[in-house]
Amino acid sequence: MKTRFMLAAASALGLMLAGNAAMAQGAAPSCPIKLGAIIPLTGPQGPIGKPIADTAQLAVEHVNAAGGVKGCPIEMVLRDDTGQPTLGVDAARYLVDVQKVPAIVGVVGSGIATAIVSAVTTSAKVPMVSCCAVTPTLTRLSEEGKTGGYFFRTIPTSRVFAVAHAVAATDRGYKNPVVIYVNNDFGSALLRDLEKAIGTLGGKIAGAIPYNENQPSYRTEVNQALALKGDALILIAFSQDGATLAREWISLGGTQNLVLHNTLRSQDFISAVGARFLTKAAGIDNAQVAGASVDAFNAGFKAKFNRDPVGPGLHTVYDSAVVTALAMQQAATLDGTAIRDALRQVQDPAGEVVVPGVEGIKKSLEAIKAGRKVRYVGATGPFTFDKNGDVTGPALVWKVEDGKLVTDKVIDLEQMTALFKRIGY
Amino acid sequence: MMGTLSYLVFFVTVASLFAIATLGLNLQWGFSGQFNAGVVGFMAIGAYTYAALTAPAQHEHVGGLDWPVIAALVAAMAVTALVALAIGLVTIRLRTDYLALATFGIAAAINHLALNLEGITGGGRGIAGIAKPFADLPPLWFGLAFLALAAGALLAVYLLLERLVRSPWGRALRAVREDEVAAAALGKDVDRMRLTAFVIGAAPMGLSGALYAAFIGYVSPYDFLAILTFQIWAMLIVGGSGNNAGAVLGSFVVWALWSLSGIVVVLIVPTKLQVQGGAIQAILIGLLLVAMLIFRPRGLMGERLHSSPLLRDDAAVRH
């Protein structure tokens, strides 16, 4: 019996993990410089991870077509973490110890990234440039000096949202907003950052009520929030729950001074709540970065995959691989510490601006070789690693006019960076 | 060379940690027939207990208690055993698939508690900066020292459990597993024996989780997903349930299947097909698991039965 059960379970697992299969590409020449990559290809995150891995390989292809690093092509050594931290750490250990990679890119899950930083890359002095881990824990570890400066990421942290919420609220003169937020790591971290941001911009949160996802009604939470008597409601909620919360809030007599999260920036939300209740509502989102560097990546992606680069992590993983390759070119030697320091040097504000794509990368590799300074402006637009290895990004504030979503204000990268400084992140 | 050695040390350490949990499961399933599908929940309790007792002071959750490593490891086992006692008392009337479902649900609940009890667990952000023993040593020496700790713990758990299952109590436990009614008719307190085995089996799972937290220095709810329960079960079944040495061997073999198959994929799959590597690896794992179960249906080392040390009868147990 036992055996038969295990047989069934084992074959089920095989099928489950085997999942999808699609197209891939690559280049495997001689004298390669190895670049480690850890990305979930199977498991629950597999569907997100595979296009990310494809895009990382596209970046490596571009670098190789542009002449490679120090005259050598790069070979990406890709490991699948399956979404399990133990396997992610195992893969990192193998890449660092046996494959001797001087840097690791990718790493999607926050739990996996933190485990790898904590157990492998910091003590091995190997920089990790994550494309997708947004957890604030890594910022804190950096602040405490526990990453040794070897952790970087190309995805903006949730602090960008906190600043945008604070700007949207204080711009409208809300001094005492109530917050209802989703009860998970994202929501609670955002709340902490939001408290700090609003405090700096001249307000104070009247109180914050967490809610658990996917409930049919949030009357209890809404009543608790109403009892706090704020002058506005900042709603950090996902779409379905957000609509339920907003409807109950308004029907129980809550103020229509709403500041809504980016997940509620949809026509569905407006029709679910009713446009006539949203005339005073504002919301926030990441601002779509536009410009030559973004177009260059989009064109390169389309040429390769014959579709637009839509999906999480595609732009950020491209930048994480390319900026690492440029840092390898910049570094005097291919060791982790030199690459760590070079990662900031290839973002020199006074340097020549270089962009994605084979041409752009070729130009920057040559400039670095000739000893000139460069500033890589990537698929995600301009970005600069701060002291914790984090990046910021632009954001926007939207509002509802005649039942339609319109952009009210853009907080560009410079303003965002200045706000970060002012708030003290 | 040094790199390969360092990786091997790492591999053996992780496999030893899993082996400790597998030994615990072997007492519960292999020797007393209790289908615990919530292994990962007990590992999580051990890991979080250790983390809470050793993590530095942080404004988001408890910390700064600064317990010594050994005391925290013992406490992790004790807390896990207590939780297992509570769960065991509630589920004592459940058998086989009913117990499996209940424990599976409890493990899921524990995962949600870890996500939501922010004050203790740090929620989804997890607990970072957990005290690592030997953290001051250079990396390779840290690896070797931790390996010694993990292997020592594994050896201790193995010897204790071996002694336990060879004792008269262990024989009675197997009797309960084979036929509860007969055992009860012979005057054995079936519920009490099952409960004791459940609690004693849970303690090593807690130890395993605690050592894992100490090794990595970070825990989050994502460390304790249901897949890990499946992996521990695979380790026990492949190794041979009802045989402690088999449980240890199975842990090494199955963990190798998961981690080394990834290496094989990197080595043999051409770069241009790398993105398929994950799928190839998954198929490889599935095929090898199936093959092992077909060719060694009782596991690599099946159970060896003898009713008393004086009367050696090495016939394998019937299934």
Image (cartoon, coloured by chain):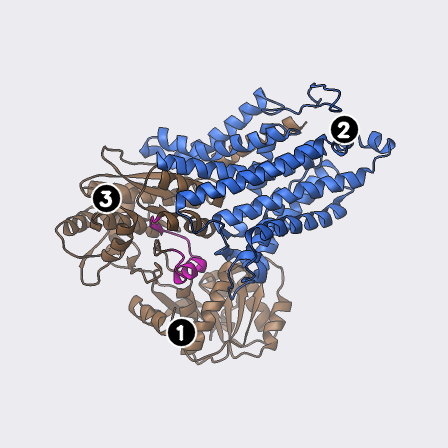
Chain colours: A brown, B blue
Which amino acid does the dot numbered 1 rest on? Val
Instruction: Examine the rendered structure and indicate whether residue B110 appears above or below residue A387.
Output: above
Is label 2 in a helix, a strand or a loop? helix
Residue kind at label 3, given as amino acid type: Val
- Please tell me whether residue A134 belongs to the stretch shown in magenta: yes
Q: Which residue is mark 1?
A: A167
N-term-proximal mark, 3 vs 1: 3
Residue A56 % position (x, y):
32, 44
**Which residue occupies 32% across, 41% down?**
A101
Q: Amino acid at mark 2?
A: Glu
Mark 2 and mark 1, same subunit?
no
Can the viewer see residue A170 in this picture?
A: yes
Q: Which residue is mark 3?
A: A63
Q: Quadrant of residue A37?
A: top left
Residue bounds of the magenta highlight: A125-147
Q: Tell me the subunit letter for badge 3.
A: A
Q: Quadrant of the N terminus of chain B?
A: top left
* Residue A409 visible (yes or no): no
Question: Given contact means CB atoms under 8 Å apart, are the residues at marks 3 and 1 in contact?
Answer: no
Q: Residues within 10 Å of mark 1 (few under 14, many from 20)?
A: many
Residue highlighted by disc 2: B178
Residue B187 percent across, percent down from the top left: 86, 34
Q: Residue at x 56, y 41 (%)?
A: B228
Q: x%, y% of residue A167?
A: 40, 73
| Residue A54 magenta-highlighted | no
Picture quarter with the C terminus of chain B: top right
